[in-house]
Amino acid sequence: MLPSHDRFKYSGIRQRPVFQWPENKRLAVYIAVNIEHFPYGVQCGVDLDRQTQPWSQRSWLWREYGNRIGEWRLIELFDELGLNVGVIVNTANYVHCPELIADHRERGDELIAHGRSNAERQIEMDEATERAMIQEVTAFMEKADGKRPQGWLSPYLTPSLVTTDLLVEAGYSYVLDWGICDEQPFWVDSRSGPILSVPYPIELNDQPAIAYRHNSAHEYCDMIVENFDEMLRRSATAPLVCSISLHSFIMGQPFRLARLRKALQHILAHRDSVWLTTPGQVASHYRQLPAPLQLAAR
């Protein structure tokens, strides 16, 4: 037998109970936008078109474009289309560009915890350090936003072996780290009880698509449309979550925005048939379903 995480059991989509989203809809659609900030002079993660040293000024500035320009353009697009989104955000952004976070807060968008900075990766932390970081982030966002964040995504999707346990201990109600393996929510075990996993995309995520696979804006937005159409068709037999993940410094570029607008307009043409929502609302609705309709961890 191969080693297992022992947090949830296998479940094939065809063997699951059927439930409904609000208004008896079968497809939930949410958009998540990632807002990041890095300390100057430290590792900034993936670069767009070439391998660089662990730190480079151009990589830092690429992300800063998202904070100065790209995310404001995305907000304008969401205003134009009447969409609320989930905002996956480093707490460093609350200090670096507080007016940007305030604008999302005033729009009624959901603010989702994403660590202090994407320069830090939980998989590299010992348990005490990670626990302190999660507590610091949670307290910071609660003070700034007037309420505790309900959801968490680990920076760079690199949780440690105990991240799930620490999130439950810190009072989080859902996590996105496990969600790339499913199109429905499901429960994940921890040392202190279960936490809900909400779907999160790795394929419909603009960073791996554009920075790693070098898909064009045209190709990426075609992926959004075709994925949505196929999921809408398949949701007739199983309720699903269609999730789209954007980064301010990638899709906030003008030439990509033009394509993104068309893709989102295509989705909005089906507004009466789908539930346009946020990750937190998905988690809240699922938690209220009768227990036999939920996918238990064990």
Image (cartoon, rainbow, N blue to C red):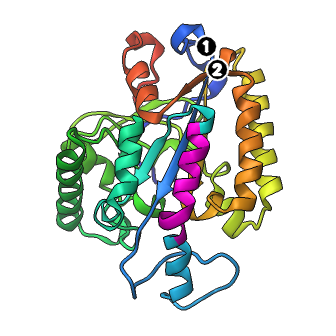
Residue 36, magenta (yes or no):
no
- Amino acid at pointer 2: Val
Task: Judge by depth and name the residue closer to the eye, 295 or 77.
Answer: 77
Tag 2: Cα neighbours inside 10 Å, few (<14), some, or many (≥20)? many
Do the numbered discs 2 and 1 sit on residues whose CB atoms are within 8 Å? yes
Q: Which residues are magenta?
A: 65-79
- Does 121 sit left or right of 212 as displayed? left
Quadrant location of residue 193?
Answer: top left
Q: Which mark is residue 25?
A: 1
Task: State the predominant SS element of the stretch in magenta.
Answer: helix
In this view, 59 is above or below 78: below
Q: Which mark is residue 274?
A: 2
Q: Which mark is residue 83?
A: none
Q: Position of residue 252 (x, y in %)?
A: 62, 58
Precedes in sequence: disc 2 or disc 1: 1
Q: Position of residue 273 (x, y in %)?
A: 68, 16
What residue sits 21% from the left and 39% below the top?
Answer: 171
What residue sits 51% from the left and 76% below the top?
Answer: 45
In this view, 147 is above or below 276: below
Hey, which residue is sitting farthest bottom in the picture? 53
What residue sits 41% from the left and 25% below the top?
Answer: 296
